Image: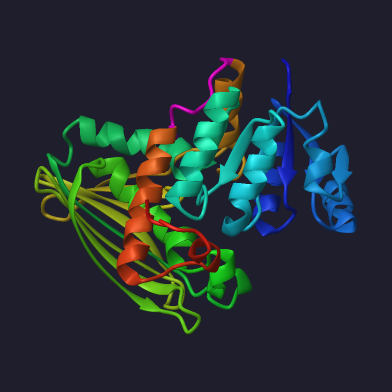
Amino acid sequence: MKKLKMAIMGAGHIATKMAAAINGLDEIEAYAVASRDLEKAQQFAKEWNFAKSYGSYEEMVEDSEIQLIYIATPHAMHYENAKLCIEHGKNVLIEKAFTANAGQAKELIDLARNKGVFVAEAMWTRYMPGLSMIRDIIAEGRIGQVDSVEADFSVPISHKERLHSPALAGGALLDIGIYTLTFASMFLGDDVVSTRSRCIKYATGVDATDHIELTYRDGRQAFLRTSMVSGSRNEGKINGTKGYIEVSNLNNLEKIQVFDAMGQLQETLVPPQLVNGYEYEVLACKKAIEAGKIECAEMPHAETMVIMEQMDALRNTWGVVYPFEEEKENVWD
C-alpha cells in the first residue's frame, strides 16, 4: 500500500486533532509540519511523529515530497495560506470555514481548477459514516417525509482571542454556526427562498449569538441557533411526518436516536470511528487525489460556495464586517 505523505500548516489545537488522526491511519504518512515558530514546529513534530519540521510556510511548500497539506491556521489566514500552497502545486485540505468570505473561496477554487490542484474543505461532518446512516433511515421512510430541521450548537468559547477578534474573522458563525447551516443543508438541501435572522454582537463587533430561520422552496424550514457565550448545547433534530431523529453532537454525529410519532424511542445508533473522526476526510482526500480529481464528492466545491455565500449574506444583514474586507470594494459581491 502506497502511503500519502501529508503535512500540516499551523501547529495549534486543531492541528493536534488532525495529527492524531494521521497517526492512526496506516495509509497516511505523518511527513511534515510548519509553524512561523520553528521551535514550536519541532516540538509538534517530535510529539506527533512527523518526519520534518519547518519554521516557515514558504519553506514547507517547496518540499516536493508533500502530497497533501492540511491548513490548520485561523480563518483569516486560510486564503493566503491556501493560495501559497496551490500556487506551488500542492493539494490542500482547508479547515472550515474554508475562507473568511465567498469572494476568497471562489478565487481559491478558480485558482485550483486552473492549476489542476486538489482542494477541499475539512467540514468533517460531511465525510462521516453517521451521515449515510441518517440518510438511510430517512430513505427507508422510518420518520416519513422530512419537514423541518432544528439545530443548536452553543459553547462558551468567547474567551479565546481569535474568536472575539474581528481581524481574525472571529465570531460564532464561522467557527460553530457553520455546523448548524451544514446540518440544515445535509437534510433539506440548498434551495432556500427566505432567510430571517438576528444576532447579538460581542463587545468587539463580531457575532456572539445567532438565530437563523431558513425557509425552502418546498415549504420546509430550518430553525438554527448558535452562541459562543451561552451554556453548552450541541444537538440536532430532523422532524418527519411519522417521527423524528435526534443527533447528539451535530458536528461529529456522535449518537443517533430514532423516535416514532408518539415520541417513543425506536433505535439508538452509534456511528463507527476509526480514530477521532478527522480520519474520514483524510481518506476521502487520498481517494480523490489518487483518482486524479480536484475535489471530494463528499464536500464538492459547489457546496463550499453555497455555505460561504450563505454566511456572507447573514453577516451582511448583521453588519458584521472584518477589517481586511473593508479594505476592498464590493466585499459582498
In the drawing, does residue 59 fall left or right of residue 189?
A: right
Kindly tell me whether residue 9 is visible in this rendering.
yes
Q: Residue at x 66, y 47 (%)?
A: 81
Q: Residue at x 50, y 59 (%)?
A: 328
Residue 294: say if magenta. Answer: yes
Which x, y percent locates residue 192? 20, 47
- Characterize the magenta stretch by its predominant secondary structure: loop
Q: Residue at x 73, y 17 (%)?
A: 2
Q: Quadrant of the N terminus?
A: top right
Which x, y percent locates residue 300? 43, 32
Viewer-proximal residue, 119 or 103? 103
Kindly tell me whether residue 284 is visible in this rendering.
no
Residue 34: say if magenta. Answer: no
Query: Does residue 24 lie above or below 236 as drawn?
Result: above
Viewer-proximal residue, 246 or 7? 7
Instruction: Give, as a single range, the part of the protein colored magenta.
Output: 291-300
Which x, y percent locates residue 309? 36, 49
Farthest residue, direction bottom: 203
The color scheme shown is rainbow
Which x, y percent locates residue 120? 53, 35
Res 275 quadrant in image: top right
Viewer-proximal residue, 185 or 46? 185
Res 237 quadrant in image: bottom left
How many badges with numbers are in the image?
0
Farthest residue, direction front: 329
Query: Does residue 316 lie above or below 292 as drawn?
Result: below
